[in-house]
């Protein structure tokens, strides 16, 4: 490989001596997968630069480019292919494993154990006037920048140019997309992408104006690319979901949250009005009840006073007829009647008791549906769920899973093996794989029964930092150990600091308890 890089350095030295906006995070993510495809001819110790183009990864070890970029390598055994990625510090050799000049496509197998983050192909219809970005390595830019030898043989960021689709134009041989994103020699084989960073086509050729670089570009359509890859036995990631901006999703979620808060507030107001009406009715009823009770107490007290007067008269009669003992007993009864009348009169309910009786009645009504009059039981969120994606609330860019079954335990254990950590009102776990340049944060909100998956397609530097942080914490299986749960929570927070503000993809699943 070092010998190849030496050849390329000498070849480039000879070359230089001669004559609707996309989401930046998505364009940056797409650029990770774009490569410079370099060809050099060797003859003993001599080397000659043959040419270069662009390409993009559709699998970790496979690159798509134009057939005309690598045509000479198939014809001349002395021509070797080098793949220079956009990031990192390593270049790779390449070998053509599929070749289709009929639609100007070729597939290169990476050698030397090379692996790159693959792109996603957009398989849906491309609207006329849609925003597009061409990504690649135009030679005119290399010359204008005066790049030195090391710059040309080492990984560097590709050039991005913006334009719009001018319509689908089918050539005599294959299906193409006509667009206005500026391209030049060296862009051949590079991807034409949409605002979400998905492949719409592979730039192939351009219209010329007075011998200058292209005013319009033609890209081999994604339909041709997917068909070519199927025939080559390569299963590429693809989606037909239209691109939506993160700003649109955020605005929609804010509106949804505002509507939810408005519904909660309306429900509270309705409940308050209902309670007020109930209190008014209770107050009227209680006032009537207390008035009746007061009247009854007073009537009984009056009756007892009348009876006591009768008893006093009877006692006098018995005393006059020498029935002293009977008179004393009757007089005692009269005294008891007077005391009873006074007590009954004093025990009549006061109007100040109305508020206390209303409160007691409302509490009794509140506890009427509870078992035993205690605190209401809180339903457990644990159990099996069937989660379905809500496409209207999701930003789908690189993948799609319509249904997702999960088994949730109240302590944050998912599917009996993965421990999530507390993350505000939800539980989250961050996944940092060793073989992919993707950081995924999965979260479950038991109160809302919502599962979300956020994917960040980050650069190599950010991915390396995320892996270093993850190693400090290790992989955690399900546990109830508070120290471990705290570590998981810290890991999510620490890795988040290395991620962009917005994920490249956010999938929102709405869940329901699965039927046993």
Image (tube, rainbow, N blue to C red):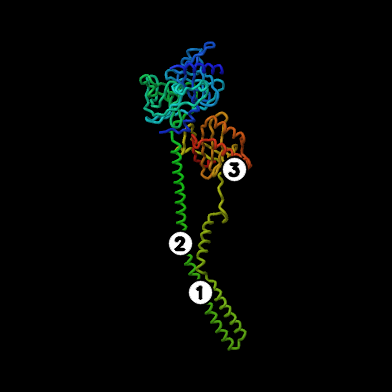
Callout 1 crowding tier (Cα within 10 Å): few <14, some 14–19, many ≥20 = some
Give the position of the N terminus as an image quadrant.
top right
Residue, disc 3: 411
How many numbered marks have been drawn onto this rendered protein structure? 3
Vertical order, 450 against 178 (above or below): below
Callout 2 crowding tier (Cα within 10 Å): few <14, some 14–19, many ≥20 = few
Q: From this viewpoint, is residue 188 visible?
A: no
Q: Residue at x 51, y 74 (%)?
A: 298
Q: Which residue occupies the foreground of this view, 376 or 262?
A: 262
Residue 280's label in the rendered image is 2
Residue 298's label in the rendered image is 1
Observer-side mark, 2 or 1, equals 2
Label 2 SS: helix
Give the position of the C terminus as an image quadrant.
top right
Q: Position of residue 51 (x, y in %)?
A: 47, 17
Comes first in the chain, label 3 or label 2: 2
Label 3 SS: loop
């Amino acid at each position: 490989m070092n010998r190849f890089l030496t050849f390329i350095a000498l070849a480039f030295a000879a070359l230089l001596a001669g004559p609707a906006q996309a989401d930046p995070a998505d364009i940056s993510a797409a650029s990770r997968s774009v490569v410079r495809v370099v060809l050099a001819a060797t003859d003993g110790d001599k080397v000659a630069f043959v040419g270069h183009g662009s390409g993009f990864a559709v699998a970790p070890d496979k690159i798509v480019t134009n057939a005309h970029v690598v045509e000479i390598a198939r014809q001349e055994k002395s021509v070797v292919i080098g793949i220079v990625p956009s990031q990192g510090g390593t270049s790779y050799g390449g070998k053509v494993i599929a070749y289709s000049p009929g639609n100007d496509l070729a597939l290169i197998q990476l050698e030397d154990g090379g692996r790159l983050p693959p792109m996603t192909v957009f398989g849906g219809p491309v609207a006329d006037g849609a925003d597009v970005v061409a990504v690649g390595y135009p030679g005119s830019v290399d010359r204008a920048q005066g790049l030195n030898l090391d710059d040309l043989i080492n990984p560097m960021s590709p050039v991005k140019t913006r334009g719009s689709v001018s319509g689908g134009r089918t050539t005599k041989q294959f299906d193409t997309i006509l667009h206005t994103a500026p391209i030049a020699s060296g862009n051949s084989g590079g991807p034409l992408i949409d605002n979400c960073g998905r492949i719409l086509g592979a730039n192939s050729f351009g219209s010329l104006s007075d011998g200058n670089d292209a005013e319009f570009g033609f890209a081999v359509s994604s339909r041709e690319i997917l068909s070519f890859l199927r025939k080559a036995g390569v299963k590429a990631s693809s989606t037909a979901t239209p691109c939506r901006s993160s700003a649109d999703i955020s605005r929609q979620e804010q509106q949804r949250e505002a509507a939810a808060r408005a519904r909660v507030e309306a429900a509270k107001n309705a409940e308050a009005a209902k309670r007020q009406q109930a209190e008014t009715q209770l107050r009227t009823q209680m006032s009537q009840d207390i008035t009746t009770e007061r009247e009854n107490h007073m009537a009984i007290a009056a009756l007892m006073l009348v009876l006591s007067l009768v008893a006093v008269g009877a006692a006098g009669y018995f005393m006059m007829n020498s029935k002293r003992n009977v008179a004393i007993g009757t007089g005692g009864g009269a005294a008891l009647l007077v005391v009873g009348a006074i007590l009954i009169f004093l025990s009549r309910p006061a109007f100040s008791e109305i508020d206390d009786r209303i409160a007691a009645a409302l509490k009794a009504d509140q506890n009427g549906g509870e078992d035993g009059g205690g605190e209401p039981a809180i339903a457990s969120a644990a159990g099996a769920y069937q989660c379905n994606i809500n496409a209207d609330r999701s930003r789908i860019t690189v993948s799609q899973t319509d249904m997702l079954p999960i088994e949730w335990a109240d302590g944050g254990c998912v599917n009996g093996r993965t421990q999530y950590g507390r993350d505000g009102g939800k539980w989250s776990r961050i996944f940092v794989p060793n073989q992919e340049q993707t950081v995924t944060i999965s979260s479950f909100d038991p109160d809302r029964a919502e599962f979300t998956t956020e994917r960040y397609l980050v650069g190599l530097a950010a991915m390396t930092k995320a892996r270093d942080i993850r190693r400090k914490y290790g992989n955690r299986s399900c546990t109830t150990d508070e120290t471990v749960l705290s570590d998981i929570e810290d890991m999510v927070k620490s890795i988040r600091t290395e991620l962009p503000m917005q994920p490249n993809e956010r999938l929102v699943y709405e869940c329901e308890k699965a039927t046993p």
